[in-house]
Image (cartoon, rainbow, N blue to C red):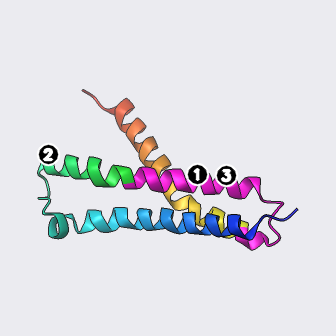
Amino acid sequence: MKIKVKAQFIDYLLIVIANLAFALIFIFGYYKFEWFGIIPGYAPYNFAFNVGVILPLTFISFAISVFVFFRALLNWKKRPNKLDNSFLVFFSLPSIILVIRVFISLMFHIFTSNY
């Protein structure tokens, strides 16, 4: 039984949205002074910017990537072209790896800090 073309298109559309959100994280972070007037090193503005812009984009990118990743793994046998699954898995990994890396570094920082 093959997967429907509409479901395959939705997977591709979701992975494009996830990677666009992933790219916007870095673009907004780089141009935050020019575009948003966030002064580097000024904690309240940086915190509000991170909570209001970076955190939602990260969550959106991570959630969509995990959804597409598991959907590609579950439908691995149903897709006639294995390159489609490989493409979806490959392009869902960057945001998943970013969130896991940040979580591990946060846990490492929490458990190794001397307060």
Question: Picture coordinates of residue 54 (x, y %)?
Answer: 32, 54
What residue is at 13 percent from the left and 53 percent from the top?
41
Quarter holding the N terminus? bottom right
Answer left or right for 104 relative to 83. Answer: left
Residue type pointed to by label 1: Val
Q: Is residue 37 magenta?
A: no
Answer left or right for 44 relative to 76. Answer: left
Q: Which residues are magenta?
A: 57-84
Element type at mark 3: helix
User: Crowdedness of circle 1 by 10 Å Cα count: few (<14), some, many (20+)?
Assistant: some
Compared with 109, 22 (above or below) is below
Q: Is residue 71 magenta?
A: yes
- Whether residue 97 is visible, yes or no, is no
User: To which quarter of the image does residue 23 belong?
Assistant: bottom left
Q: Are marks 1 and 2 in contact (CB under 8 Å)?
A: no
**Which numbered marker is on residue 70?**
3
What residue is at 80 percent from the left and 66 percent from the top?
79
- Whether residue 108 is visible, yes or no, is yes
